[in-house]
Amino acid sequence: MKKLLVTTTALVGFAFGAQAQQITVMSWGGAYAESQIEAYHKPFTAQTGITVVSVDADNPAVPVEAQVKAGNVSIDVADVEYPDAVRLCDEGMIEPIDHSILPPAPDGTPATEDFLPGTLLDCAVATITFSTIFAYDASKFPEGPTAIADFFDLQKFPGKRGMGKRPRANLEMALMADGVPAAEVYDVLSTPEGVDRAFAKLDTIKSDIIWWEAGAQPPQLLADGEVAMTTAYNGRIFNAAIAENKPFTVVWDGQIQEYDLWVIPKGAPNMEAAMEFVKFSTGTQPLADQAKYIAYGPARSSSSALIGVFKDGKTEMLPHMPTNPDNMKNALSSNFEFWADRNKELEERFNAWLAAN
Amino acid sequence: MAEAIAQAGGGLRTADGRPLGEALAQAQSRARRRAFLLVAPLLLFVLFSFVVPIGQLLVSAFSDDDFARNAPALGAWFEANPRGTPIDEGAYAALAADLKAAKENRTAGQMGERINYEVSGARSLFTSTARNADKFEPPYRESILAARAEWDNPRLWESMRQASSSVTPNFFLAAVDLRRSETGGIERAPEEVRVYQMLFVRTFALSALITVLCLVLGYPIAHLLATLPLRYSNLLMIFVLLPFWTSLLVRTTSWIVLLQSEGVLNDMLVGLGVIGDDGRIRMIYNQTGTIVAMTHILLPFMVLPLYSVMRPIPPSYVRAARSLGATSWTAFRRIYVPQTMPGVAAGGLLVFILAVGYYITPALVGGATGQLISNLIAFHFENSNWSMAAALASLLLVAVLILYWLYDRLIGIDNLKLG
């Protein structure tokens, strides 16, 4: 599944011709990696002459950890989720990033104030906020599901369900569907009874779930008619619906917001160029540009003001952003502390639950 | 033999006057050395690509020094104070010292992670306590417990005691759904995380089933191939070999196309009116998917050894049996089948051992219930819990070796004919 995308548009400047440099950036593939190539990689190469090789993984935090542990690092920059960034930083697997090197906003606001609260970590810089939502095929359900509870309602909305093959987001959605208000989800999930309750709710649809592993899979499952609805990253559904004209509708109720962040693995082969890349791509303009290609919100306030239309030139991006007030009526912010601590343990339980008949 | 010649021909000498036996022994040992040199590259290759990695695997299944390496002070305290000693000020002082060092080296996460395998929540306890490690002052016990009361947990300390030695059987225990209790004894893991015993059983049961299916499907094919005239059988052989030469991934994904609920087979059944549009059968992303795809993929490993054994069997034996009054069934059962046993044994062993370690096919088409133990080994490798992966892999290796031994005892490895 891990396909290699090589950006071939290296406009290698004359001056750099002799020592053409190259960095490897690992991301999540599909429409998301595409948006990064357009908004970050290509302009970066044009400006610095450093070629950017984009490689994909189902979750880049996994190869980063494995490579650092094995002492054989080939990734220069990786795009990881918040809890993984916190965990990798705690374990000394990624490099600290000095926030003062990050470019200020065009009006001079320093980066530390311009970035949304909590999006600058000791070893990571956020680029986008995305959300895990569920989406359905509108041609199958004209009177579509509107609430997260509908996802778990096989009577009212029969058909297979697609879900990510990991506990994160699934457990929260299960609890919200079970009637837990968004504000209390993590309080409930912190208790053993709460975890039991979430798994019990998942049990009610377990035999109808098809599990996906890569972010590019859920739109495919929907398009194939293999599932009637699926959880997904909102940008992937947006891309299928708008760019590929698929009849997919996003249900924002019970959405779970998270961040994606750049990290630099310890021992990255091109450390300096990697830092340059992080610096460049987290500038106001590149972050705003990315929203032209995918419906993920930029992590800088100064970029939010610049969000306009999709690359097709007519679709307004704001209504498709997870942070749009209309979409925020019942939204949950993923609790990174909870997942940094409990992910491995809940993954074990999830595996056991999954494998049991 | 050289000695025998040397004794018998004690009087004989070569042209240069040496005893003949001695000269012969020397020449033979030279030939042996030369032969050894010829196979030496292969031996080295096997050593470095097989023996050494498996040795490393076994070693890493027993050891994990993420905690021990980063907690020298605690290690010393545990050494000086045997199990049962109350956790006193000295222990907390050691903890404070180690956490302080962990803060500087950013290793608290690693330490916590190792303990977290056994005590949930330990990871955050380590990282959050280490963040304030500079502020701890004597008496450390009060100071640390004031920061996080969770440190006063006997299970946590027992787990740290075990982790302070880098050699541990705990991964093997975990690999069979056991764990250490608070007092250091062994108990079963909580029910909701038990998975490995069931998966081992499932892996072997499914592999056995797949082997039987391959035999049932492969035997007639091989028989047909072996009895047809060569020009037809060669053509048919291509049909066996073509999928064999096709990439594993391609074959697996084509099964997805065929079997998925909007796939070819379901569409056909709906079109024929056998099933309704909402009654589409789920044939993939479950155990059925794993069984179907793996049977197909492993079938050539059954057909080829069977064919190579059946081909040279002279048809005259069965004819003789028939002419002596045996029914065709009796002649087949008592004359033909026993002659094909070496092929059945070889094909069965090949298919079974390949199936036990299969990974990519169950990962792609197995959904949740069609996963095998190899998928969990891959999961642990991916998540950098190498010791756990190694422990599971070693158990799998041992299980296969035991089966192989049993097989040798029951059927005899000499009866195996691969072609």
Image (cartoon, rainbow, N blue to C red):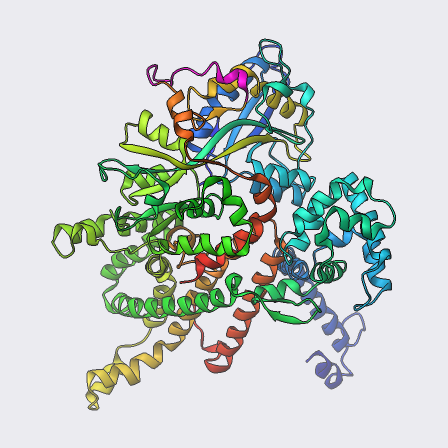
In the rendered view, does B400 fall on the left or right side of A148?
Answer: right
Residue placed at 38% from the left, 68% from the top?
Answer: B211
Prevalent SS, magenta region: loop
Foreground residue among B345 and B95: B95
In which image quadrant can residue A318 be found? Answer: top left
Foreground residue among A5 and B87: B87
Residue placed at 68% from the left, 80% from the top?
Answer: B1
Q: Is residue A266 magenta?
A: no
Image coordinates for residue B42, horizontal then vertical, percent:
61, 58
- Number of numbered labels in the structure image: 0
Magenta-highlighted residues: A300-315
Image coordinates for residue B301, horizontal then vertical, percent:
39, 62
- Tell which residue pokes out farthest to the left in this image: B273
In the rendered view, does A150 fall on the left or right side of A22?
Answer: left
Quadrant (top left/top right/bottom left/bottom right) for the C terminus of chain B = bottom left
Position above or below: B324 against B198: below
- Tell which residue pokes out farthest to the bottom in this image: B324
Asked whether residue A104 is in view, the answer is yes
Position above or below: B107 against A113: below
Image coordinates for residue B313, horizontal then vertical, percent:
32, 75
Image coordinates for residue B161, horizontal then vertical, percent:
76, 61
In the rendered view, does B14 fall on the left or right side of A77?
Answer: right
Position above or below: A78 against B8: above
Foreground residue among A108 and A347: A108
Residue placed at 35% from the left, 53% from the top?
Answer: A205
Residue placed at 66% from the left, 64% from the top?
Answer: B170
Position above or below: B10 against B247: below
Asked whether residue A93 is in view, the answer is no
